[in-house]
């Protein structure tokens, strides 16, 4: 018969490397026919006063064998399940949480696409501008209130440098570089020193449009803007042009669309008028053309500027402009399906 010491050594040195050797281990140490069980059979031949100590030793042996078996069984099972995870290429992958595009970006892209379809090219320019491109070239009088510190963020050390208050500065930059025909849209961020409320923010986005060529008329502008409104808000939408004033256009008009919430019947959003304003527009003032080096006798053009936040609020019926800047995921997630 094997000695306790021998069996202990065998238990410790037995190499368990796979299911087969694990089974061999079990057969060797954990069955009724094992050497350990044979030792239990010997108890009756031991002197009564030593039986307890002997029994304890073989119980420890048995426990140790069981412990090695359990540990190795678990190890092999873990390895096996890791292996099967890698091997099963048909298994669905873990879900990846996909973000959504910001509603302002979605709207900017939509506007861009609609105008690109009729031959407009998208151009961008600097957020930090100078007085010439934002005001002077656009025919703002020296004392025009828009230049006032109330509305414009000036750079303290350089009163000539400011954050652009509108994307109309890009009209100037475009016409300075390029002769007609010109057909551009200019999306961008603009800045105004305004109190932040549910309807106004100190940062927002505009898309400027400019069309300059020979014989461009007010009717061309009206048709272009109608085309835009119907593609953006649906074929049933109506537009309305109201006379207005901008230093850089003459004549000037603000454009309303029929309220897309109540269909013109009157609701809170349109303040029960059935109409909501979405953009400013007009025929480019000849002074502006001349300021940019374009012959105003030969060429005419129209321009328009629309507020992206306002249009997004209308299209997706949100009632607080601040939501667009807070980036609360619960708000943004709702635009997942509109991302494409
Ligand atoms: N720049 C104007 C604004 O920020 C919007 C605008 C009005 C742009 C008329 C134009 C225009 O090009 O023709 O309120």
Image (cartoon, rainbow, N blue to C red):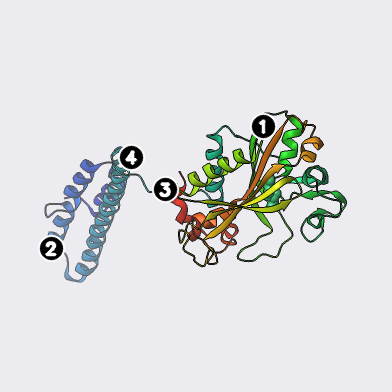
Q: Which mark is residue 86?
A: 4
Looking at marks 4 and 2 on the same chain, the residue that comes earlier in the sequence is marked by: 2
Q: Position of residue 141 (x, y in %)?
A: 84, 50
- Residue denoted by label 3: 96
The one nearer the camera, 239 or 113, is: 239
- Judged from the image, the secondary structure of the residue bearing numbered disc 3 is loop
- Mark 4 and mark 1: Cα distance apart in space: 69 Å
With respect to residue 211, does 199 lie above or below?
below
- Residue denoted by label 2: 45
Looking at marks 2 and 3 on the same chain, the residue that comes earlier in the sequence is marked by: 2
Looking at the image, residue 59 sits to the left or right of residue 82; the answer is left
- Residue denoted by label 1: 215
Q: Does the image show residue 337?
A: yes
- Mark 3 and mark 4: Cα distance apart in space: 18 Å
Image quarter (top left, top right, bottom left or bottom right) of the C terminus? top left
Q: Position of residue 302 (x, y in %)?
A: 67, 40
Marks 4 and 1: which is nearer the front?
Answer: 1
């Amino acid at each position: 018969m094997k000695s306790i010491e021998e069996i202990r050594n065998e238990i410790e040195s037995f190499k368990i490397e796979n299911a087969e050797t694990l089974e061999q281990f079990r057969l060797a140490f954990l069955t009724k026919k094992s050497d350990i069980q044979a030792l239990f059979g010997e108890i009756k031949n031991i002197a009564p006063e030593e039986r307890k100590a002997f029994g304890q030793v073989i119980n420890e042996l048995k426990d140790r064998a069981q412990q090695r078996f359990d540990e190795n069984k678990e190890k092999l099972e873990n390895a096996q399940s890791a292996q099967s995870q890698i091997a099963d290429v048909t298994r669905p992958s873990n879900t990846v949480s996909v973000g959504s595009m910001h509603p302002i970006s979605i709207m900017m892209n939509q506007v861009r696409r609609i105008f690109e379809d009729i031959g407009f090219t998208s151009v961008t320019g600097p957020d930090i501008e100078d007085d010439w491109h934002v005001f002077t070239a656009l025919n703002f009088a020296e004392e025009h209130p828009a230049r006032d510190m109330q509305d414009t963020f000036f750079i303290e050390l350089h009163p000539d440098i400011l954050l652009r208050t509108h994307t109309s500065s890009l009209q100037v930059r475009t016409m300075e570089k390029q002769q007609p025909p010109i057909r551009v849209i200019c999306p961008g961020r603009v800045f105004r020193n305004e109190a932040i409320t549910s309807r106004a923010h100190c940062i927002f986005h505009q898309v400027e449009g400019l069309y300059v060529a020979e014989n461009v008329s007010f009717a061309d502008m009206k048709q272009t803007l109608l085309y835009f409104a119907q593609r953006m808000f649906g074929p049933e939408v109506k537009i309305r042009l109201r006379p207005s004033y901008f230093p850089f256009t003459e004549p000037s008009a603000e454009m309303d669309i029929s309220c897309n919430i109540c269909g013109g019947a009157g609701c809170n959003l349109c303040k029960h008028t059935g109409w909501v304003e979405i953009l400013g527009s007009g025929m480019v003032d000849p002074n502006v053309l001349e300021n940019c080096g374009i012959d105003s006798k030969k060429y005419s053009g129209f321009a328009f500027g629309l507020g992206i936040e306002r249009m997004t609020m209308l299209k997706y019926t949100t009632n607080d402009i601040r939501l667009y800047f807070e980036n609360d995921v619960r708000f943004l997630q709702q635009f997942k399906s509109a991302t494409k």
